[in-house]
Amino acid sequence: MANELVLVDNYCTVTKTSLSFKRDVSKEEWQKVFDACRHIEGCIQFWIGDLLKYREQRWGMYDDIAEETGIEKRTLKEYKYVSDKIKPSLRNDNLGFYHHKAVVSIPPEKQKEILRQASENKWTVRETREAVKAI
């Protein structure tokens, strides 16, 4: 993940609401930045979930975060729940948050296997859910 952040930073100026290139780039460089952004986009839910886990462990519940951020409480709980159930060591960098959410109900060793298969076979979230149901 750090590589994606560095890559975007090397080529672009990024704000909360914009991205602009620091210089003219080739089509290949543009594609690298695009791919990095797509990768980053699938990470934010885990980052928020892990932040909420840390806060809860250190200072207790996080009910005020929903009000402060405008993110619905159920969304925050979902992010934290999935982050709790899928250990960082089992998370697959090639898959998004909702692939991981699909496997929360199965044991960790099965999570790892299904996530591996989903990555290798480029499964959709629906296909990942179906594989979990088949267990």
Image (spheres, rainbow, N blue to C red):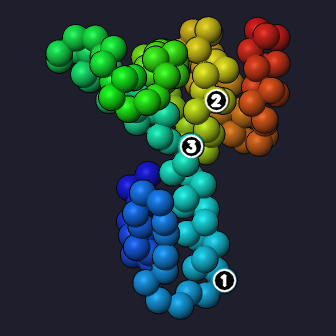
Q: Secondary structure at mark 3?
A: loop
Residue 4, position as x, y percentages in the image: 46, 60
Q: Residue 2 occupies which quadrant of the picture?
A: bottom left
Few, some or many C-alpha atoms within 10 Å of disc 1 (few <14, some 14-19, many ≥20)? few
Question: What kind of residue is marked 3?
Answer: Gly
Nearest the camera: 59 or 36? 59
Q: Which image quarter: residue 6?
A: bottom left
Q: How many marks?
A: 3
The residue under label 2 is 98
Residue at left 61%, top 38%?
A: 96
Whether residue 83 appears in this view of the structure is: no
- Residue 89 horizontal side relative to residue 128, left or right: left
> What is the x, y in percent for residue 25?
56, 87
Judged from the image, the secondary structure of the residue bearing numbered disc 2 is helix
Q: Position of residue 29 (x, y in %)?
A: 58, 79
Structural distance between the alpha carbons of marks 2 and 3 = 9 Å
Q: The disc labelled 2 sits on which kind of residue?
A: Tyr
Query: What residue would you read off at disc 3?
Result: 42
Q: Nearer the viewer, residue 120 or 2?
A: 2
Q: Amino acid at mark 1?
A: Lys
Distance (Cα) linking label 3 and label 1: 23 Å
Please tell me which residue is depicted at 64% across the width and 29% down the height of the picture: 98
Which mark sits nearer the N-terminus, 1 or 2?
A: 1
Label 1 sits on residue:
27
